[in-house]
Amino acid sequence: MKNQLDFEKPIIELQDKLDDLRKHPEKHSLGVNFEEEIRLIEKKLEETRRHIFANLTAWQRVQLARRPKRPYSLDYIASAFTDFHELHGDRLFAEDRAMVGGFAKLGDHRVVVIGTQKGRDTKENILRNFGSAHPEGYRKALRLMRLANKFNLPIITLIDTAGAYPGIGAEERHIAEAIAVNLREMILFEPPIVAAVIGEGGSGGALGIGVADRVLVLENAYYSVISPEGCAAILWKDRVAAPKAAAALKITAQNLLELGLIDEIVPEPLGGAHTDPPAAAENLKQRLLKNLEELLALPAPERLKKRYEKYRAHGRFVEKKDMQGNGAAQAAA
């Protein structure tokens, strides 16, 4: 199977055996009860799948988050939202195809939805810049959020990016300033904001549309200040240490929920969102609706107060004493 991951090999082998038995029963020994054999393999396949996906490492979840067949922002917008009308351009420099957004409906609620968008093949990835937005992408997102604020429409953001584009052109057009302005403005917008990390949530590129009242992360997505490969290159001087870095960074949805950095984990179909995109979209839709309706029930001043307190509470510290008994604070999260 194309794009097979190492930990999926036992599942693939059982699936191939099952397919072969169904398609070519004549190749197998006479006297075999094929229906019983098929049932046994199906049971073993289900057990193997559940065991593997219940015990994934952080690095394995990172690999799942990067699966090319995984649903992207526009896939979720098409499945979970209705009446989507895309808006283009930042009205300052250019249109950035790595950032998509516009007006839509989530259930009965009119919203503005914004997301980072990757490509499926080489041609589309070049068009979408591999999901890494330029400054104009973040300024387009800000323009749409200001529209939402003006018309009192809730804001939904879908995050799936390895990070903002780090090229010279992006630096020349002030990528850091564009992201920083988004952080400042998003903390102040009055309408409810719900962010969902649907795949990769990399560094400031993710945070540039990630300041929200509620932050959701899909079960096999990750959210991190740096990629595991980047961390490994800095700390271990070798990208081969990426699995070790992924574990140390505490970047999985489960870790982030335990640390209080996100609000909810959105379950995925067994095997990952790419195995059943419609079910994944329905799960995400229901969680978005639940959180949005809870936020809409709060007065705007209370919502803003809670949003401020949420981000002020981020970060945990422990104090260790040296040999002389002097305290030294170290960040734990």
Image (cartoon, rainbow, N blue to C red):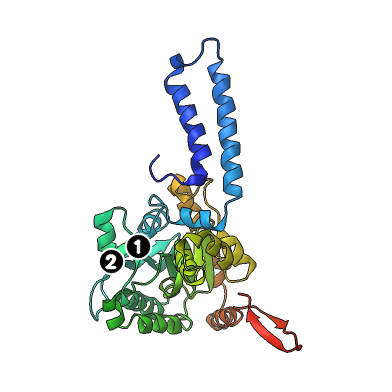
Identify which amino acid the numbered label 1 is placed on: Gln
Q: Earlier in the sequence, mark 1 or mark 2?
A: 2
Mark 1 neighbour class, 10 Å CA radius: few under 14, some 14 to 19, many 20 or more: many
Amino acid type for the residue under numbered disc 2: Arg
Tally the numbered discs. 2
Residue beneath label 1, please? 117
Residue 83 rendering spot, x and y as whole percentages: 34, 60
Quadrant housing the C terminus: bottom right
Q: Residue furthest right?
A: 325
Q: Residue at x 56, y 41 (%)?
A: 49
* Mark 1 vs mark 2, CA separation in Å: 7 Å
Q: Is residue 173 visible?
A: no
- Quadrant in the rendering for residue 66: bottom left
Q: Nearer the viewer, residue 72 or 129?
A: 129
Q: x and y percent of residue 37 in the render?
A: 56, 22
Q: Is residue 201 visible?
A: yes
Up/down of 189 relative to 58, above or below: below
Label 2: few (<14), some or many (≥20) within 10 Å? many
**Of the numbered discs in the image, which one, if any, rests on residue 97?**
2
The reply to whether the C-beta atoms of the residues labelled 1 and 2 are less than 8 Å apart is: yes
| SS type, badge 2 | loop
Q: Is residue 15 toward the left or the right of residue 142 in the image?
A: right
Circle 1 — which element?
loop
What residue is shown at x 75% (from left), y 89% (from top)?
324
